[in-house]
Amino acid sequence: MGQELFGKGKENMIEQKNPSVYDYDACRALWQRVSPSEDPYPAAEEVGTQSGELSLPGAEGDPCCMGTEAADSVEVLQGFLREELGDAQVYAYLAANLPRRETARLFRALSEEEKRHARDLAAAIYLITGKPYCPRVCVERPDMGDLCALLRALYHGEACAGYNYARAGEETLDLCLGKLFAAMSADEYRHAETLLKLLGRKISI
């Protein structure tokens, strides 16, 4: 497939001995077949190339995603991860102790989604820092004496989490991290809607 893309001549193939360096002329020739009117590297000579070679993004030591721009958000990510683990514990406890199967399934699903959030956040932290972050989180068991009051508290927690994820997404300069925060925000708002409907059934008039 590589020969079809860059041509069969050795001069048009990526140098295998150094995969982080590409054949500048071959890349330019390929791009001009795709878009003849555009030069993919108009300022390449200014930044300096040697022997017709150019280091492309992706070969850089500092990647364009989950790199320097995301480093300022590591503590925020860690805080979100701890919250997700705590929420997962609360929902798992409710799923195990509520009598109605339908409600138990709902909370079990919420618990699994919060665990998935925690895994995604842990992966993002590792991508940014190169170090695993696995905190131990233990939350108090929720008071189930007044289920409506508990649902009210859980709703506000999910809605606030949705807002905080959205705000974090707006503040970060890292595109990939911003997309992750936006997806998390949408999930948390969806959780809040689920709890709202459940509360509505409990206090229906």
Image (cartoon, rainbow, N blue to C red):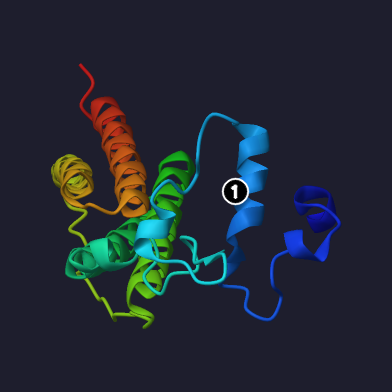
Label 1 SS: helix
Residue 2 position, x and y percent, is 79, 57
Q: Left or right? Give the position of 130 relative to 8.
A: left
Residue 159 position, x and y percent, is 19, 40
Q: Left or right? Give the position of 162 relative to 100.
A: left
Snapshot quadrant of residue 167 = top left
Q: Residue at x 42, y 46 (%)?
A: 42
Residue 177 position, x and y percent, is 32, 54
Snapshot quadrant of residue 64 = bottom left
Asked if residue 35 is positioned above or below residue 158 in the image, the reply reads above
Q: Residue at x 26, y 37 (%)?
A: 192
Q: Residue at x 41, y 42 (%)?
A: 103
Q: Left or right? Give the position of 4 relative to 138.
A: right
For the C terminus, the quadrant is top left
Residue 92, visible in the rendered structure: no
Snapshot quadrant of residue 140 = bottom left
Residue type, label 1: Arg
Asked if residue 66 is positioned above or below residue 6 in the image, the reply reads below
For the N terminus, the quadrant is bottom right
* Viewer-proximal residue among 176 and 117: 176
Residue 76, visible in the rendered structure: yes
* Viewer-proximal residue among 20 and 134: 20
For mark 1, what is the residue? 28
* Viewer-proximal residue among 140 and 34: 34
Asked if residue 193 is positioned above or below residue 80 in the image, the reply reads above
User: In the orientation shown, which residue stands out farthest toward the top?
Assistant: 205
Q: Left or right? Give the position of 120 relative to 73.
A: right
Residue 153 position, x and y percent, is 14, 46
Q: Residue at x 40, y 66 (%)?
A: 48
